[in-house]
Amino acid sequence: MLARNSEYAEREIGVANRVRRATDNAYRQFVEYINARIVVEETDRYEQFVVWLNALILYYKRHAIRSS
């Protein structure tokens, strides 16, 4: 247990926050890209993908809320 506590104490502070900001930024860029493709191509080609992705995001939001 002492070894685990030492590892925890040596952990870099703020890593989770930096990783979260990076993933949030990547997600926003991805959404902007998909939305731009939808506007430019004016097609329903992405509809099934967007519906699937929104369902996946909703699932994880609910799961994260329940487990925290």
Image (cartoon, rainbow, N blue to C red):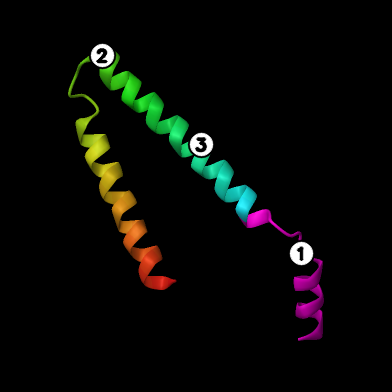
Say which element carries label 1: loop
Query: Within the image, what quadrant is residue 4 found in?
Result: bottom right
Which residue is identified by label 3? 26
Q: Look at 26% across and 35% down and name the residue there.
A: 49
* Vertical order, 46 against 54 (above or below): above
Membership of 13 in magenta stretch: yes
For label 2, the crowd category at 10 Å Cα-Cα, with few meaning under 14, some 14 to 19 and many 20 or more, is few
In reply to whether residue 68 is colored magenta, the answer given is: no
Q: CA distance from mark 2 to mark 3?
A: 22 Å
Amino acid carrying label 3: it is: Ala
Using the numbered discs, state the Cα–Cα distance from disc 2 to disc 1 in whole angstroms: 47 Å
User: Could you tell me residue 16's position as x and y percent?
Assistant: 62, 56
Distance between mark 1 and mark 3 Cα atoms: 25 Å
Q: Is residue 67 left or right of residue 46?
A: right
Above or below, 11 relative to 30 = below
Marker count (numbered):
3
Q: List the residue tagged with mark 1.
A: 11
Q: Amino acid at mark 1?
A: Arg
Residue at mark 2: 41
Indicate left or right for 3 with 30 as reference.
right
Residue at disc 2, secondary structure: helix
* Dot 2 amino acid type: Glu
The local crowd at label 3, few if under 14, some if 14 to 19, many if 20 or more residues have their Cα within 10 Å, is few
Residue 32 drawn above or below residue 66 = above
Quick check: marks 2 and 3 in contact, CB under 8 Å? Answer: no
Q: First in sequence: mark 2 or mark 1?
A: 1
Q: How dense is the environment of label 1, judged by Cα within 10 Å: few (below 14), some, or many (20 and up)?
A: few
- Relative side of 44 to 2, left or right: left
Q: Secondary structure at mark 3?
A: helix
- Which residues fall within the magenta stretch? 1-16
